[in-house]
Amino acid sequence: MAVSGVLGAAGETTTFEGQAGQTLSILPGGALAGTADLGAGDDVFQLAAGGQLLGTVLSGTGSDRVDIDLIADLSLRGDQLQQFETLQVTGAPAPPLTSHLQ
């Protein structure tokens, strides 16, 4: 699913059904405002430069990946990305990454 507007609202959860891997892409100008539960499977969450992660993404079981494209500073809380195994950050040039994840 590609999001160019706003997906969800604070306090709401959007659940993706099925066992197959899900891909959720927040495009430039798009935002995830609530919680997205990608469920089981090998999931991918993509945050494009200019997209906003205001809520939380839960990936569930499987081999899951976060792809973040940065062109400026980005601050995330440690609880915004849950149950992911791989983090890939790109940018031009790729900025330094500071993590306080638990």
Image (tube, rainbow, N blue to C red):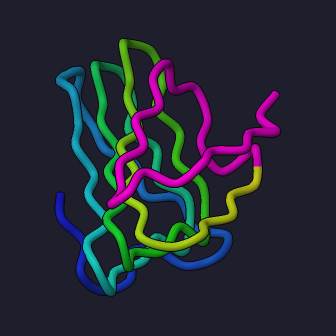
Chief secondary structure of the magenta portion: loop
Instruction: Tell me residue 47's x, y (percent).
Output: 37, 59
Instruction: Tell me residue 78's x, y (percent).
Output: 76, 44
21 lies left or right of 6: left
Instruction: Tell me residue 37's x, y (percent).
Output: 46, 44
Q: Residue at x 65, y 76 (%)?
A: 10
Name above or below for residue 85 compared with residue 27. Answer: above
Q: Which residues are magenta?
A: 78-102
The answer to which of 52 and 73 lies nearer the viewer is: 73
69 lies left or right of 52: left
Outermost residue, top direction?
A: 62
Which of the 4 image quarters holds residue 67? top left
Q: Residue at x 43, y 58 (%)?
A: 14
Q: Considering the image in quadrants, where does the C terminus appear?
A: top right
Outermost residue, front direction?
A: 93
Instruction: Tell me residue 83's x, y (percent).
Output: 57, 25
